[in-house]
Image: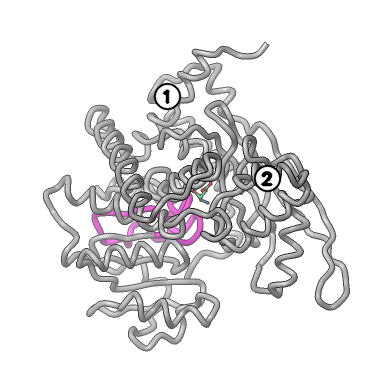
Amino acid sequence: MIATAEQQKKGMYENVMEQFHKTADTMHLNPNIRKILGITNNEIIVHFPVKMDSGKVEVFTGYRVQHNNALGPYKGGLRYHPTVDVDAAKALAMWMTWKTSLAGLPYGGAKGGIQIDPRNYSMGELERITRRFTYALGENIGPEHDIPAPDVNTNEQTMAWIADTYMSTKNPSERSQNQHVVTGKPVGSGGLEGRDRATGYGVYLTIKLWHESKGETLKGKTFIVQGFGNVGHWVSRFMEQDGAKLIAVQDAHATLFNLEGIDVNDLFEHSKPRKGSIKGFEGAKEMEPEDFFAIPCDVVIPAALGNQITAANAHKINAPLIAEGANGPTDNEGEAILLEKGITIIPDILCNSGGVIGSYFEWLQNRNGELWQLDEVMLKLQKKLTEVFLKVEKMVDEKDVDWRTAAYMLAIARIETAYIQRGIFP
Ligand code: GLU
């Protein structure tokens, strides 16, 4: 089953720090830059009251951690989940710094959210929680300073509320200049055509490129997906379009399999009225959650939460490729086992970077008062991601390192160069 809240949180920060120091050693990172990148610049914690439907007031705690902004404004999602705390946000913010740097974007890294299970609140309550959180963050976010986006359990509606609240605190004449305070907005409110599928598309594209470099296509390949939210659902659609077969899927409620193939659209239609849950789908059978990762297949796609592939289950994995749709789904012990077995891991900061690249396009669109078309967006995304993928692949070959180390080396080197060129104030 998807790991418990405690298991998901455990060691996320230690994980990312260990990955960072390992790479810093391999690339002989300048020791001053190592000190700077080893800390998070700002850790903002806000407490704010919200009136519930019952008339009672509840106090919530929200977080925004800004890791580094050497390359541009802070960028990264806001998640609503019981696992959100300072350490989780610190780890996720650091991953965002590497992700934006690797993609060559003019951004730094941040992450935040609220420690709640949104299923326990009505739409009206979620709207008031979101708006009050935005108000409490105040000028800690801003279109040229720190730009949130959707993440686990937040979506375009959440972003629309944040944008509206933030813009409402400005002079009417400045309102439209502040629309790009968040990305991932609904298309009718400054959102980008295609931002919804950008992350899933990117995951699919990296899987496809990996196979192409081996002279293979996705036709007839089998894959399993953990998580059927925005990322899991879209990646499955794109894989299916190329002739690959979804044979198992797991979410917080159920683990399903069908070796003949699960129809992605049917599963999506089933989950829609059930708050996204896949439970009860008739086109597949339920199986023991512990056996999910043991299913033999061509690609494993963890697209749910952190710390899912660990020492407890990595040895069971029976696939040549893992594509990290989620952030931090493989912990370091799990990774060591997988690498030992010769399994390739396309790391999160490359694999799921289509989302933040799409966010960058949306930000540019808003900033320049433009409207981009879907085909134009998808083409630009494909071009950008392919370029990044090939760079990482080259590094893997040249330095004879695993994919995560190669991606980290490229990401960290870009920030190191910027610091060395500019020096440290004062
Ligand atoms: N939450 C997404 C991520 O982890 C997107 C971040 C963004 O677009 O700023 O990459």
The answer to whether 225 is drawn above or below residue 309 in the figure is below
- From mark 1 to mark 2, how far is it between C-alphas? 25 Å
Rendered location of residue 397, percent (x, y): 22, 32
Task: Look at the image and name its color scheme.
Answer: one colour
Q: Is residue 311 visible?
A: no
Residue nearer the viewer, 61 or 354: 354
Decide if residue 216 is on the left or right side of residue 388. Answer: left
User: Which residue sits at x=58%, y=22%?
Assistant: 35
The answer to whether 254 is drawn above or below residue 318 in the figure is below
Q: How many tags in the picture?
A: 2
Q: Which residues are magenta?
A: 302-330
Instruction: Mark 1: give few (<14), some (14-19) or many (20+) Cα within 10 Å.
Output: some
| Residue that numbered label 2 is attached to | 64
User: The residue tagged with tag 1: helix, strand or loop?
Assistant: helix
Seen as rendered, the residue at the extreme right is 56
* Label 1 close to label 2 by CB (< 8 Å): no
Three-letter code for the amino acid on which mark 2 is drawn = Arg
Seen as rendered, the residue at the extreme left is 215
Residue nearer the viewer, 11 or 426: 426
Dividing the picture into quadrants, the one containing residue 9 is bottom right
| Residue that numbered label 1 is attached to | 413
Q: Which mark is first along the chain, 2 or 1? A: 2
Residue 325 colored in magenta in the image: yes
User: Which residue sits at x=25%, y=77%?
Assistant: 261
Decide if residue 141 is on the left or right side of residue 322. Answer: right
| Quarter of the image with the C terminus in it | top right
Rendered location of residue 348, percent (x, y): 42, 47
User: The residue tagged with tag 2: helix, strand or loop?
Assistant: strand
The answer to whether 151 is drawn above or below residue 276 in the figure is above
Rendered location of residue 419, percent (x, y): 53, 18
Instruction: Mark 2: give few (<14), some (14-19) or many (20+) Cα within 10 Å.
Output: many
Three-letter code for the amino acid on which mark 1 is drawn = Ala
